Image (tube, rainbow, N blue to C red):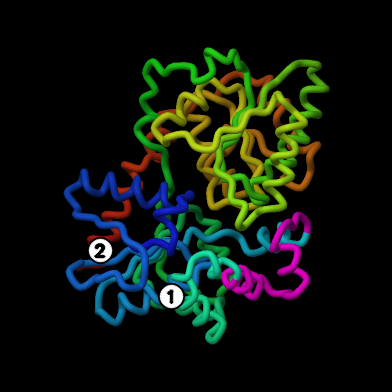
């Protein structure tokens, strides 16, 4: 499994997907290694599975290397809607995005500009980024899709968006993301805030960055507290990056100081996250764009009502969640209020069977086996 440069150090949703899929594949008897970087030796492997397409120039170079070695190539693009990304760039820009939207009209040019900036902090990205300047990032992504034997998408919408954006046809299979075993078998979990007496809180997981929309969530929570006339705590879990989001992090830190009812925790081990969801009143994800909205799924599996945004999340969650528009603070507040008042969600056995890493690994293995025939 090949991931983007910096994956192992920086983490993210793709790291969660790769590590959990690999873990379950190993239980099925498959030998799996996870690596990053163009120098990775793939000669001893039967098949290579590449992850991440958006914003990532090295993916094409991985794909080219795999096909030159005459090996099957499976691609998990983890693709976001370009239309949603453009809307986000145009209406909610901070930091470097303010400059990129002024300099460039097309989204792939903006992404290339941001990769140039990121390369100064990670020299390993210079080569792939330089290649994308010469060839064109969008053209590289199109070639990657053409090289893949099978493209694994997380939603039907992802496949349609890919075809619409890049104008190519490809063989694809839907493999839904899932939750770990710790979300399926909670058992007797301990209240992480028992000593602090934080109760009935709103809970949001994700890196502190504009896309995750924490500042609008804070404003919505203020409105909600006023409407209920009640002290409702808000808890964030997520790392901060001042290299990429210095302005946004500064605004977030300022909001923390001004509102002592907000608690921020930088890191929580993945296996401990279920307890935080379980004792929350509402799990909220008001992101401007996501591939699926996996944290909302985790909230539901922990018996907590979820607020989510976007049509892709709805493909997973259906009528089990409450939905909001990320650009509208009142919409977020209204969804929070409805979720806060609602009875705990009821998740049926079919949903629990479908959205697990075990099931994702099983479907992924079927694709591997077909590719090796």
Q: Can residue 362 be spotted in the picture?
A: no
Q: Secondary structure at mark 2?
A: helix
Instruction: Look at mark 2 in the image and give the residue it sits on.
Output: 370
What number of labels is visible? 2
Q: Which residues are magenta?
A: 91-116
Q: Can residue 219 be spotted in the picture?
A: yes
> Residue 180: percent from the left, percent from the top?
37, 36
- Asked whether, in this view, residue 318 is left or right of residue 124, the answer is right
Inter-mark Cα distance, 2 to 1: 23 Å
Instruction: Look at mark 1 in the image and give the residue it sits on.
Output: 60
Q: Does the stretch in magenta take in 111?
A: yes
- Quadrant of residue 6 in the image? bottom left
In the image, residue 223 above or below residue 104: above
In the image, residue 311 above or below residue 91: above
Front residue of 292/283: it is 283
* Residue in view at x 42 percent, y 36 percent: 270
- Quadrant of residue 70 in the image? bottom left
> Residue 286: percent from the left, percent from the top?
66, 42
């Amino acid at each position: 499994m090949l991931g983007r440069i910096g994956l192992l150090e920086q983490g993210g949703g793709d790291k969660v997907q790769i590590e959990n899929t690999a873990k379950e594949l190993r239980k099925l008897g498959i030998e799996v290694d996870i690596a990053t970087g163009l120098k990775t030796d793939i000669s001893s492997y039967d098949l290579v599975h590449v992850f991440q397409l958006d914003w990532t120039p090295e993916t094409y170079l991985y794909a080219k290397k795999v096909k030159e070695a005459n090996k099957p190539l499976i691609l998990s693009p983890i693709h976001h809607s370009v239309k949603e990304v453009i809307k986000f760039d145009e209406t909610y820009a901070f930091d470097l995005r303010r400059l990129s939207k002024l300099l460039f009209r097309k989204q792939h040019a903006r992404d290339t500009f941001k990769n140039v900036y990121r390369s100064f902090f990670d020299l390993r990205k210079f080569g792939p980024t330089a290649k994308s300047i010469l060839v064109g990032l969008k053209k590289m992504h199109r070639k990657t899709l053409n090289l893949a034997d099978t493209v694994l998408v997380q939603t039907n919408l992802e496949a349609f968006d890919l075809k619409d954006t890049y104008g190519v046809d490809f063989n694809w299979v839907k493999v839904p993301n899932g939750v770990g075993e710790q979300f399926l078998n909670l058992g007797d979990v301990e209240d992480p805030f028992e000593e602090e007496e934080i109760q009935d809180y709103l809970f949001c997981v994700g890196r502190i960055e504009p896309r995750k929309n924490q500042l609008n969530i804070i404003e919505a929570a203020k409105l909600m507290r006023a409407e209920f006339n009640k002290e409702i705590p808000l808890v964030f879990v997520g790392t901060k990056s001042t290299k990429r989001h210095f302005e946004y992090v500064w605004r977030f830190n300022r909001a923390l100081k001004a509102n002592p009812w907000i608690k921020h925790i930088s890191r929580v081990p993945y296996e401990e996250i279920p307890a935080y969801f379980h004792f929350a009143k509402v799990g909220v994800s008001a992101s401007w764009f996501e591939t699926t909205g996996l944290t909302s799924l985790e909230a539901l599996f922990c018996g907590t009502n979820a607020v989510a945004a976007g049509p892709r999340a709805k493909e997973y969650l259906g009528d089990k969640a409450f939905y909001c528009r990320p650009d509208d603070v009142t919409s977020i507040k209204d969804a929070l209020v409805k979720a806060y008042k609602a009875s705990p969600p009821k998740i049926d056995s079919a949903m629990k069977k479908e959205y697990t890493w075990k099931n994702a690994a099983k479907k992924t293995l079927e694709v591997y086996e077909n590719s090796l025939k």
